[in-house]
Image (cartoon, rainbow, N blue to C red):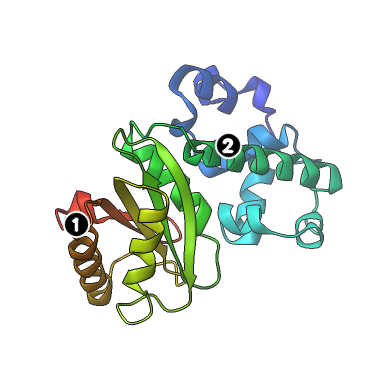
Amino acid sequence: MIPISEWPEAERPRERLLSKGAKSLSDAELLAIFLRTGIAGKTAVDLARDCLHNFGGLRPLLLADENEFCRLKGLGQAKYVQLQAVLEMARRHLASQLNPGESIQNPAEAQQAIHTRLRDYPYEVFAVLLLDSRHRVLGFEELFRGTIDGASVPIREVISTCLRRNAAAVIIAHNHPSGVAEPSQADRQLTDNLCSALSLVGVRTLDHLVVGDQECVSFSERGWL
């Protein structure tokens, strides 16, 4: 085994992150930087690959409970605690983009924040991001849980929420617990109904986001709004 410190500089994860950015690294390389060290006979990258193989990918590893996480050789309670702290910091950073008073300048940031909020629910959740006329956040409200279709989402309550918060625009969103973000025909019909109803009270529907496991489908980007 050749230690990572003896690898060519262009192949070392830390150096590559600094020169090319974190997005240039594989899941194993990112995890190796977090792990910092390997175990006897394995570099941190080797250990990271073993972890991803045993857990079935990065996300199952990040969602593992303490017992599952610590079961693998090379991991332990200290690493579990560090990982949970990192994850919580990331959640709080993304959630801060939905704080009241924050201005939504970049639609991609709103998508990422909403994706993080809704992706892990084991049931469907319908939510609205309420904005003022300058696209500043008024609030983010999870309104309904259960099957999301035209029959189960009371449009009157959505309108009531918008009027109560004096919203000028909204981004509506819901998740697919199956992990597949592709919108259904019922999703498209619900969107049409909501857009029409909200426009009658002067509220613009900027987007409908369907949240899956790995991606977030935007109706606006698809040209459906």
Q: Which residue is drawn at 65% across and 37% down?
A: 89
- Res. 2 visible in picture: yes
Measured as percent of width and height from the top left, residue 169 is found at: 29, 47
Q: Nearer the viewer, residue 35 or 133?
A: 133
Measured as percent of width and height from the top left, residue 213 is found at: 46, 60
Q: Nearer the viewer, residue 69 or 26?
A: 69
Q: Residue at x 59, y 24 (%)?
A: 14
- Mark 2 or mark 1, which is nearer the start of the sequence? 2
Q: Which residue is drawn at 42% across and 68% down?
A: 176
Is 138 displayed left or right of 91 in the figure? left
The image shows residue 93, relative to residue 176, as above or below, that is: above
Going by the numbered disc 1, the residue's amino acid type is: Ser
Q: Is mark 2 on a helix, strand or loop?
A: helix
The image shows residue 18, relative to residue 107, as above or below, that is: above
Q: Nearer the viewer, residue 78 or 157?
A: 157
Point out which mark residue 30 bears.
2
Residue at mark 1 = 199
